[in-house]
Image (cartoon, rainbow, N blue to C red):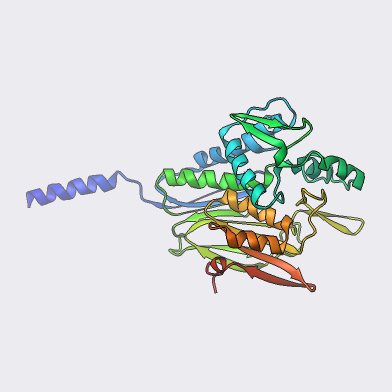
Amino acid sequence: MKNAVVVLMCLWGLTGCRQPVSYRYAEGKIYGTFYHISYASSGDLHRELRERMEAVNASLSMFNPHSVIAKINRNESNQTDSLFRKMFDMAQEVYRQTEGGYDITVAPLVNAWGFGVGQKDVPDSARVDSLLALVGMDKLQLVGNELIKALPEMKLDASSIAKGLGVDLVAEYLEERGVADYMVEIGGEVRVKGLSGKGRPWRIGIDRPEDDVTGEKRQLQMVAEFRSGALATSGNYRNFYLHEGKKYAHTINPKTGFPVQTEILSASVYSPSCMEADAYATGFMVVGLKKAKEIICRHPDLEGCLIYEADGKLDVWMSDGFERLLVP
């Protein structure tokens, strides 16, 4: 009996020194948008998670004059860091798979159309043609830690992939700390693992793609449910402006130099990596319905849902794997 009491006291001591695991929540503003993180942990990790997100700003933000990418754009340096190289490798792969539909060298065009650094503007065809000469990832070469640009006037815009990278960094840190259940969302790009606080797989809503700059009238088109992986959605129904009655959306076609005019209204991509999903979702907005379908069907890690306009009405195409994610 005495031995049993000793064992019980030891067990109480072991469990008593541990903090109970509970769902914790972190939220704030980053990358010009908002983040929401839910995770099951015995400790508050918000400060460390914030540091991972800020590391992306320090490397890839065009709006941070001290970032790696800003210095490269100003030709003050050609040195890269590990986050830049991680982003660049993925961007190159998506560039190849989309045959140039996805391209981070569109920064001069993004700026000219007023969606980057500068005022909102509508450039004429002559200006667009001149800027197209600066576009093309085939004009870039990463040699060791140095990025070599074929033309010094070239500029890079990683905004279509940086949020996804930020999500991945937070998710990877949580997993390093042994967190088995989490949801990381930054500006609509999401990665999850395990179960939510309700004891079920995480449920992520996909918006109906209707023009609404404020997001106040948002309606859900569908809800996906999954235990692991990432989901990113790109569309032109939030970030756009009207000029003389015409809509100009933020996704720029790197081949034409003009805002995209394909039939796709939104592209949602499910992938193990949020950075990959983020980049492909943007690329699909550019390449159009037929090409996007082909890429999704041949890529072993991608599932996709494309909402498009046909005969003036919304229609939906999705891969078999994506359909299995949906909540009935």
Image quadrant assignment for residue 223: bottom right
Relative side of 91 to 126, left or right: left
In the displayed structure, does residue 247 sit left or right of residue 88?
right
On the rendered structure, is 244 left or right of 98? Answer: right
* Residue at point 61%, 46% (across, down): 93
Q: Residue lying at the far top in this picture: please name it.
A: 76
The residue sitting at 60% across, 38% down in the picture is 56
Residue at the (52%, 69%) spot, across then down: 324
Q: Quadrant of residue 75?
A: top right
Q: Residue 102: horizontal and vertical position, in percent? A: 70, 49
List x then y, in percent, for residue 15. Answer: 27, 48
Q: Quadrant of the C terminus?
A: bottom right
Whole-percent x and y of residue 114? Answer: 82, 45
Task: Identify which residue, 250 or 256, lies in the foreground.
Answer: 256
User: Residue 242: in sight, yes or no?
Assistant: yes
Image spot of residue 5 (x, y percent): 13, 50
Instruction: Please tell me in which quadrant of the rendered image residue 286 appears.
Output: bottom right
Total count of labels: 0
Decide if residue 208 is in sight here: no
